[in-house]
Image: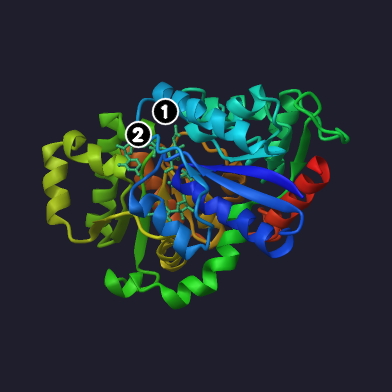
Amino acid sequence: MIKIITIIGARPQIIKAAAISRAVRTSFSDRIKEVIVHTGQHYDHNMSAVFFDELKIPKEDYNLNVGSASHAVQTAEIMRLLEPVLEEEKPQGVLVYGDTNSTLAAALTAAKMHIPVIHVEAGMRSFNKTMPEEINRICCDHVSTMLFSPTSTGTENLCREGFSENARAPYSINNPLVVHCGDVMYDNSIYFAAEAGQKSTILSDLNLTSGEFTLCTIHRESNTDDAQNLNSIFRALLHIAENNKQKIVIPMHPRTSKILPQQLQPELAERLERNYDIQIIEPVSFMDMIVLESECNLIITDSGGVQKESYFFKKPCVILRDETEWVELVEQGTAVIGGTDTESIIDAFNKLKSKNLNFPPLFGDGHAAEFICEQIYSALN
Ligand code: UD1
Ligand code: UDP
């Protein structure tokens, strides 16, 4: 039996962790013991607790309760509080997801204690180091012992940075495993889609008709904290809603809800107030989210996870960023880089709304989590 510590902190990590926890519970319970540490980076009920119940994730064994703070303080606090937990638990590996401050802090802490870091969603790059996430991912990959990439683009990025896909066991920080494994988020979307369809009442709650609304999420630091970008995005959303009588549902991230009243120009705020086609709501549960994703006509987002889910649920996607890590979506033509310029967002929306699109499988077979568990067990056992 090996012991791994799984680190979660932000919403998408809690959701991703559901897939591996499920695989451990159903197929590896005699070989892998999972201890869960929640850093507390996200803490609102609808950003954290809601997912544990509905996705059947075991309650965390430790909560570091770090909460919100500047990048440096949040990262440092996680490191300071995690170190004694790792000392006490003595795991064979520390599993981290994605690219948040929780990911970086845990990877640095574990690597310096000579505990192998297992990075799920390794190798993703935007090639824009002004994004905090790009710094987090690069640093995390370079101290990892097992790098699981959801796409072949990810392994190619890693090879360009000096990693090799030919490493053989025993793996170490100096001889890391790099492997393309598919996406645990795809595992989850497949696994929960039918249940969500039965349980969620979000369409009737919001009085929505399938195929007649657009879903939008906005939370990227460069879009919320830059008033020009935020206003430009809302100008585009208002134009789309007003000119097409298009309903737009926005489950709003707390970061955006907090800053919007301060940043939005009065003229846009008034138009938003008058427009009943734009529905701003609280963040929703994962079951509600995947129903919104599967029943909408188009997705507009700056989220990494929601971009991918647009593909899983075969919906066109306008990306509210100047670049993406998920380049396959753009190459396939199902997603368009809308950036943050009002006109280019509107153009992207118009271009995609009536286009015939193909969604060949790109993100594995829905069993990435089992593959990852198998690899972890054989490497660390
Ligand atoms: C973080 C990640 C980002 C990820 C996102 C997922 C980093 C650097 N960023 O961004 O990569 O895409 O999570 O959602 O790690 N807040 C609340 N309640 C909460 C959580 C946050 O009100 O439960 C508010 C606070 O005002 C906080 C702000 O949101 O200051 C930002 O939260 P933070 O975790 O720092 O960054 P995110 O924007 O959520
Ligand atoms: N999500 C959710 N409720 C919401 C918005 C998003 O459950 O109101 C889910 C979404 O389906 C995806 C994940 O959260 O699985 C994406 O997280 P987020 O957009 O916060 O972060 P990112 O993926 O950009 O890091």
Q: Nearer the viewer, residue 374 or 159?
A: 374
SS at circle 2: loop
The residue labelled by disc 1 is: 74
119 shown above or below 45: above
Residue 104 seen: no
Residue 215, position as x, y percentages in the image: 37, 57
Residue 86 seen: yes
- Ligand 1 within 8 Å, label 1 CB: yes
- Ligand 1 within 8 Å, label 2 CB: yes
Asked if disc 2 and disc 1 are in contact, CB closer than 8 Å, the reply is: yes
Residue 354, position as x, y percentages in the image: 45, 61
The residue labelled by disc 2 is: 68
- At horizontal 37% and vertical 43% (from top left) the residue drawn is 345
Describe residue 274's horizontal placement relative to residue 186 as left or right: left
Q: Amino acid at mark 2?
A: Ser
Q: Residue furthest front?
A: 88
Q: Residues within 10 Å of mark 1 (few under 14, many from 20)?
A: some
Describe residue 245's horizontal placement relative to residue 142 as left or right: left
Residue 320, position as x, y percentages in the image: 41, 41
